[in-house]
Amino acid sequence: MIWIDYYEFEDAFQDSRIEPDGSRFSDRLATEVAPGHPLHGRDWVVIAKYEPQDEVVVRQGSDVALVHLTFTANPPERPPLPSTTFFESARAFEAYFEFR
């Protein structure tokens, strides 16, 4: 298990591990990510949606990232879009959101 498996999201997040609704965001993520993007070519699972933004928390193996979906009319995006931030720990994840 990695830190995200037992992480408790704040109220600003919709936890897809509890309320499964990540499939529509998974489909969108797959549509937006083009070759050359760090998420391309891997099967990412959406585990939470950050409600104030068009952002999702995704996991693949031990990798965890926050992805800002663009919902552009002409996907896929050109890298580095959609913007993606990787996290190695709960502490780093929380620090990222502390002053947002």
Image (cartoon, rainbow, N blue to C red):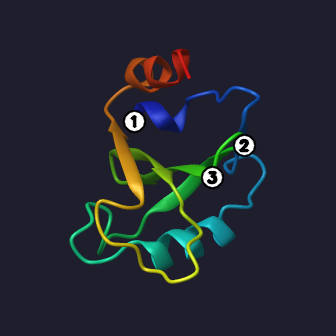
Q: Mark 1 points at which residue?
A: 2
Q: What residue type is labelled 1?
A: Ile
Residue closer to the observer: 35 or 57: 35
- Looking at this rendering, what residue extends furthest in the front direction? 73
Residue drawn at (38%, 22%) of the image: 92
SS category of the residue bearing label 1 = loop
Rate crowding at label 1 as few (under 14), some (14 to 19) or many (20 or more) other CA atoms within 10 Å: few
User: Residue 12 sits in which quadrant?
Assistant: top right
Q: Which amino acid does label 2 sit on?
A: Glu
Q: Marks 2/3: CA distance?
A: 7 Å
Residue closer to the observer: 21 or 30: 30
Residue drawn at (39%, 44%) of the image: 64
Residue drawn at (41%, 17%) of the image: 91
N-term mark: 3 or 1: 1
Q: Name the residue under label 2.
A: 51
Q: Marks 3/1: CA distance?
A: 25 Å
User: Is 33 situated above or below 75?
Assistant: above
Labelled pair 2, 3 in contact (Cβ < 8 Å):
no
SS category of the residue bearing label 3 = loop
Q: Tell whether 24 sits left or right of 62.
A: right
N-term mark: 1 or 2: 1
Q: Name the residue under label 3.
A: 54
Labelled pair 1, 2 in contact (Cβ < 8 Å):
no
For the C terminus, which image quadrant?
top right
Q: Marks 1/2: CA distance?
A: 24 Å
- Looking at this rendering, what residue extends furthest in the bottom direction? 74
From the image, state whether disc 3 or disc 1 is nearer to you. 3
Q: Which amino acid does label 3 sit on?
A: Asp
